[in-house]
Amino acid sequence: MSDAAIPTIAEAAKLIAAKRLSPVELTRACLDRIHALDDRLHAFVHLTEERALGDARAAEAAIMARGPKGALHGIPIGLKDIVDTKGIPTTCQSKILQDNIPDSDATCAEKLAEAGTVLIGKTTTHEFADGGPSFDLPKPPARNPWNTDHFTAGSSSGTGAAVAAGLILGGIGTDTGGSIRGPAALCGIAGIKPTYGLVSRVGVAPAAFSLDHIGPMAWTAEDCALMLQALAGHDPRDPASATRPVPDYTALLGAGVKGLKIGIIHHFHETDSKVSDGTQRGIDAAIATFRDLGAEIREVQLSPLQDWGACGSLISITERAAAYEEWAKTRLRDFSERVQSRLMLGALVSGVDYVQAVRRRRELRAELKAAMTGLDVVLTAAAPNEAPKIDAVPIWDLFERPSFTMPFNVSGYPAISVCAGFGEGGLPVAIQLVARPFEEPTLFRVADAFEKATSFRNTRPALAG
Amino acid sequence: MPAEISDEALDFLLARSGLALTPAQKAELKSVYPGIAAMAERVRKPRGPMAELAHVYNFTGDDVA
């Protein structure tokens, strides 16, 4: 399978339905690419080759007999290695769970399997979805397929790298402060953090309970919509699970953006935390594209990005420290140095600090709700710049600059990162689009219109030399 | 929340947390304390005692069934 032949999920689904593409051949092509490239990318911590070929053969037989049951039938995917998989190692990239083999699937894994996907393997993650690229773990960190000297962002690093390189057509990421949207941005793919509670967290290792989201990562927004269709829905085992009916996430694709109102949070990326010139050019060009497509552009003012970051970080630090307290007390040295550093921060945050952060969270969420009155989506940066070199990622980045993605974990609003071009170093830059709760169809409509109006989906990483 | 932390105060917080840190980790933690103090300051506003948390709950049908 050449780079040019890597289909999107939507393209593959059409070919499979027309019996012009075999799920077994597609799966073999993905496995061939993994065998050729993954020693440089480290996108997978565990391949499920036998399971994949079994899934693919079963899908092919069912499709030949009865036709596909949906767009994901026969599609090769990966699951981040903090997602429980029955009978398959789930290590959270940690020494502590090296021998962990769950006896049941996470809800998201179960739903994707029910949709007929082909499980290729478990993708690389930062340890317990935290900390950054670590070199003192059982497996090395994932590398950016646009330039393997560079970082993927994280913590859904393997899924980001694998999708961008065409090793899988889609995959699961998790997002507590940007762990879907960050890797999507730096790897040049699409990744959505859905509304809080839309996708069940059951069977996924927690990072911070009230900020954790599960969501799809794929080459296009349309593919994310197809995946979310299978993932969304109430799960009574998740206390945060939403009970709303699941809409058709592809219903508004192709409707364009004419007449939609898009708010730009200029101060987030222009003054609160100024992005690189390349990222700013990508954002400016995206705004011009939306204007050309007939959208109305407005300006949005919110509290400084630093306020959102402080609120989210205090909540994240404390909830993580609580979740992993037992191991932190008894097995601290078994964590990577980076995660040890994050866990010890919990000692510095008082109970009152946490509650003040949660009170601030209510105020910030009300502020965003008011600011989005009359708007369909808002736009800001997804990442501050192109991917840095993998050995130049600071341990204490949370103190160095506030995250562009954390505001929408704090608010729980759905947010998607899509590729907005390439910076000076030839690496991707991205925009982040945000909609009101449960308005994912609008988010996909806008993101899809942007992708189709630009040429950035036509280029895959060269992975040459 | 003061912007700096003494060694004694840090030792107290660590003892309370149950974390056994190396001297290097203690020094590192002390060095980032101002960052946490700044965050804690940022989330405090003159909001009075009546301002609610984001995390509250209400009973659902399942709770009273």
Image (cartoon, grey):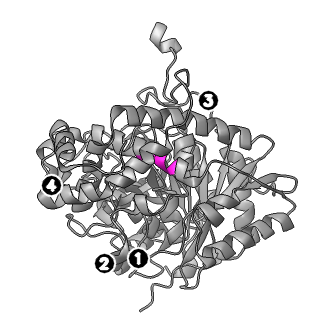
- Magenta region: which residues? A308-313
Tell me which numbered mark, 1 or 4, is placed earlier along the sequence: 1
Q: Amino acid at mark 1?
A: Arg
Task: Classify the position of the C terminus of chain A by image quarter.
Answer: bottom left
The Cα–Cα distance between marks 2 and 4, rounded to whole angstroms, is: 25 Å
Q: Nearer the viewer, mark 1 or mark 2?
A: 2
From where the camera sits, is residue B37 visible?
yes
Q: Which residue is mark 3?
A: A244
* On screen, residue A375 above or below A430: above
Residue A146 screen position, x and y as percent: 48, 80
Q: Which residue is mark 4?
A: A334
The Cα–Cα distance between marks 1 and 2, rounded to whole angstroms, is: 11 Å
The Cα–Cα distance between marks 4 and 3, rounded to whole angstroms, is: 41 Å
SS category of the residue bearing label 4 = helix
Q: Amino acid at mark 3?
A: Arg
Do badges 4 and 3 share one subunit?
A: yes
Residue A170 screen position, x and y as percent: 50, 60
Q: Is A51 in front, or is A63? A: A51
Q: Does the residue at mark 2 contact the one at mark 3 (Cβ under 8 Å)?
A: no
SS category of the residue bearing label 2 = helix
* On screen, residue A228 above or below A164: above
Q: Which mark is residue A33?
A: 1
Q: Please tell me which residue is depicted at 48% across the width and 67% down the height of the picture.
A: A163
Q: Magenta stretch: residue A309 in it?
A: yes
